[in-house]
Image: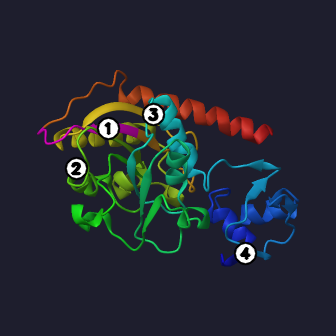
């Protein structure tokens, strides 16, 4: 039986709101429903597997993170059907949920944290829960149900530079990877502003260029680059990097046609327009 938790806490954990304060306001305004029943008290405890909705609109995945991978799969035309994936930094499991809904055969949901994965996924026989696991120390022997052939990466408080060298040691050849590039964890501290937010487009561009150079040196091919359709929980703009591991090549190739600067400009323009639209609503 699923454990119970406060509604406001669950709303934040599931990525529906950035802060508990925002979640509380929405609950008090009568906008939150659990299994189609209105929830009116922020402190009310409900089952962790309850389906929470805002204004009757159900999020298609267990967290907002699924929307990020959804964009990558659609925009980059990635086929995950019948593939074994590794979800690095799985947290609630939005990426895993999205991949499974798109036909993935199995997901290794890996995270250094504990008890974050949604109950729905924890019970799914297609999900191998790898909690309290630091990816930097995994080996091929840890993947008993087959080696991953697709990877998603959504990590915080650590640079992707510590992930990529290990990743290629546990992937099959010809594996696609979607990595969420978070400038706040890649740029130096001097470039991170108040509340941990990086706002300068030039810093975003620099981070992307440096990261692209790094993955090429690690032997990955760069196929695509775009921006996340939603900002991170702290308000940061994040970027979706699509790379590929062909297997044992010393240096990768970049076939992406646009520049990092173009992608950054598109991100700022699009998300600025979205913020203005949200304010009007």
225 or 117: nearer the viewer: 117
Taking the spot 87% from the left edge, 68% from the top edge, the residue there is: 40
Query: In the image, which residues are magenta?
Result: 241-250
Q: Earlier in the sequence, mark 2 or mark 4?
A: 4
Label 4 with label 3: CB-CB less than 8 Å: no
Label 3 with label 2: CB-CB less than 8 Å: no
Pair 3/2: label in front:
2
Label for residue 243? 1
Q: Earlier in the sequence, mark 4 or mark 3?
A: 4
Q: Which residue is mark 3?
A: 226
Q: Earlier in the sequence, mark 3 or mark 2?
A: 2
Query: Which of the 4 image quadrants contains residue 143?
Result: bottom left
Answer with left or right where residue 86 lies relative to residue 270.
left
Pair 2/4: label in front:
2
Label 2 Cα neighbours within 10 Å, binned few <14 / some 14-19 / many ≥20 = some
Residue 249 lies within the magenta run:
yes
Q: Which residue is mark 4?
A: 6
Quadrant into which the C terminus falls: top right
Instruction: For mark 4, give the secondary structure.
Output: strand
Label 4 Cα neighbours within 10 Å, binned few <14 / some 14-19 / many ≥20 = some
Q: Which residue is mark 2?
A: 168
Q: Earlier in the sequence, mark 4 or mark 1?
A: 4
Q: Tell which residue pokes out farthest to the top in this image.
A: 257
Residue 99 x/y as whole percent: 50, 46
- From where the camera sits, is residue 154 visible? no
Instruction: For mark 2, give the secondary structure.
Output: loop
């Amino acid at each position: 039986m699923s454990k119970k938790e406060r509604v406001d806490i669950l709303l934040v954990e599931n990525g529906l709101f950035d802060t508990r304060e925002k979640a509380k306001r929405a609950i008090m305004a009568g906008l939150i429903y659990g299994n189609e029943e209105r929830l009116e008290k922020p402190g009310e405890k409900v089952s962790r597997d309850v389906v929470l909705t805002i204004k009757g609109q159900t999020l298609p995945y267990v967290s907002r993170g699924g929307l990020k991978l959804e964009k990558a799969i659609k925009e980059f035309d990635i086929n995950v059907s019948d593939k074994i994936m590794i979800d690095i930094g799985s947290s609630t499991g939005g990426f895993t949920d999205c991949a499974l809904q798109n036909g993935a055969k199995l997901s290794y949901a890996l995270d250094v944290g504990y008890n974050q994965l949604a109950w729905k996924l924890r019970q799914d026989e297609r999900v191998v829960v790898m909690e309290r696991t630091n990816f930097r120390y995994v080996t091929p022997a840890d993947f008993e149900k087959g080696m991953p052939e697709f990877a998603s990466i959504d990590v915080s408080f650590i640079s992707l530079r510590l992930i990529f060298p290990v990743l290629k040691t546990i992937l099959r050849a010809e594996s696609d990877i979607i990595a969420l590039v978070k400038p706040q964890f890649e740029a130096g501290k001097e470039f991170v502003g108040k509340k941990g937010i990086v706002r300068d487009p030039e810093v975003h561009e620099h981070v992307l260029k440096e990261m692209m150079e790094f993955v090429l040196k690690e032997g990955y091919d760069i196929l695509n680059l775009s921006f996340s359709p939603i900002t991170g929980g702290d308000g940061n703009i994040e970027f979706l990097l699509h790379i590929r591991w062909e297997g044992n090549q010393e240096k990768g190739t970049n076939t992406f046609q646009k520049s990092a600067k173009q992608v950054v400009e598109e991100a700022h323009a699009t998300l600025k327009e979205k913020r203005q639209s949200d304010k009007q609503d």
